[in-house]
Image (cartoon, rainbow, N blue to C red):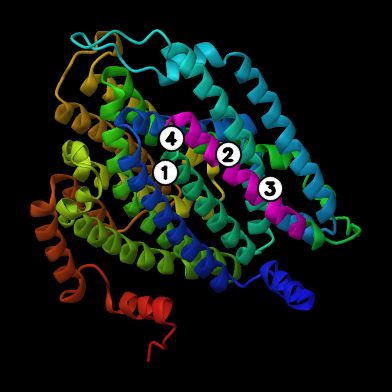
Amino acid sequence: MVVCLAALLDRLYRADSVATSVGLSAAASVISRLIGLARGVALAWLISQAQFGLFGVALLVVNVLLPLCSAGLYEGVTRYVPFHESAGALRKFVIRSSVLVFGVTLAVTVILGLLAQPVGSVLFSAARLATGPDMPAGENSAGGALMLVSLACVLTLALYHTLLGLLKGLRMFRAFSAAELLSAFLFAVLAVAGALRGFTTARALIAAYATACVVAVLVFTPGLLARLPRGDQPTGRESSRPTSSLLTYSAWAAGTAILWHALAYYPMWYLLKVSDSETVGTFHAVRIITQFVQIGAVLLIAVVAANVNRLWEHDGREVAEPRMRVLTKACLIALIAGASILSVLRPIVMRLFPSKFAVGAAAYDPLILFFLLVGIVGLVAVRLNVLEKPRHVCLAWLIGAVVNVAVSYLLLGPAADATTSTQVSALQSAAWAGVAGVTAALVVCIGLVRMERLALDLPSMVLVVAAFSVGFGWSVALPVLALLLVATFVTGHVFTPQERADLRVSLLGTSTR
């Protein structure tokens, strides 16, 4: 029994090949998201619409605060752990970086904790509608309590993501995938079980999230530490990558993450300022469904990045660039097709939620477009990442976030003058504000890759423009998709004969002959 357990652990913490790594992480990501979908649907039936909305806002606050409080250091851990492994200084780096992440995160969360009351009242308070009831007297204190729980969750997430970063950097994707699945499963079980027993507040749900992260860290950290080299044997390479490299990389990664999450969630937060928690709960429910477009995009982007990075490093730009062009067009077609199908399924998937969420259908198609465009930005950003230009990606999300804030204000109006506008109008405005922001980020990305002489070709640009048809419903998206499929498989307007052959090699590994 002990021998079998030891053999299982050895396989769990074994470094894997690129193909195995991508496959494992993709499978774990899909299953984790499905668990998250099941959790979200169950909670929509078990808790009030207002608390469901506050839970969604709390998740966005946690996602924004995580890179801010940790300075994105867990991203730097992923990037530099392979270097320190080859430099013979792995154990030293693991201990030093983990202490650094925990120390920085703890210091910032403590500072924010001292300001929890005023900050929480700003982040989690709904608008006082002109014809609605006054704000409850205890709302400010409730916001402060939710802020404290969110900060505690941020601290646990910093440790959890550091663990994931180490596993990913060491190519231990079996353990990485198992940790993701365990945390997702525990979060779902704790949240749903707690709701069934009467713990139906957003605070209880965020506490369940933090607990799941702690358990995952406690379960997988000992196995990782046991498989680190007992003693470092420096090769002299470590000094060529000082701590400043880790901090610089982490700073850009943190900035990008903060701006992306701010862009992704700001319309929902601003919706809380101009409407109420029930409307936000509806918006959050629709996001849970439509974000599956982004999940599909992440999986495709991982394949493209792995393929392109390998060719770029081993065979050079002249070989990698044509492959990147072919894979980009194939992914764009796949994403547009998937988004169009999801649009067709709207009447079915909306029935997963209680009838009180039905009004959310107004934001369904614009949110599909939002997540589709997020995926397209990720595809374009592969070109910037292969050039090691993280600041360009950060700039794109910065401009997108600014546009997002401005359009949210224009479409939803000033928060100080909140009125009882219809839910349909508010939901649509919030969704289209997000589309405006990510469109701005996409335009900037396309301009930057052109500046770096890795511009999208004409068929790719046509596909990008065609993607916007999804935002106007299936009646527009399906005819556009039909035209794209004809252009792809019947004519040579999308892929040249050589590109078709290259695509077969990429996808199937077959010979071009």
- Whole-angstrom CA distance, mark 1 to mark 3, is 27 Å
Task: Decide if residue 227 is on the left or right side of residue 346.
Answer: right
> Which residue is most to the front?
197
Tag 3 residue? 77
Q: Earlier in the sequence, mark 1 or mark 3?
A: 3
* Amino acid type shown at disc 1: Leu
Q: Position of residue 257 (x, y in %)?
A: 51, 38
Examine the rendering and report whether any part of residue 78 can be seen.
no
- Whole-angstrom CA distance, mark 4 to mark 2, is 19 Å
> What residue is at 34 percent from the left and 53 percent from the top?
292
Say which of 466 and 367 sits in front: 367
Q: Decide: marks 1, 3 in contact (CB < 8 A)?
A: no
Tag 1 residue? 448
Q: Is residue 228 above or below residue 500?
A: above
Q: Is residue 363 above or below residue 118?
A: below
- Per the rendered image, the range of residues in magenta is 198-224
Question: Would residue 274 be counted in the magenta stretch?
Answer: no
- Closest to the camera, between mark 2 and mark 1, is 2
Q: Position of residue 423 (x, y in %)?
A: 17, 27
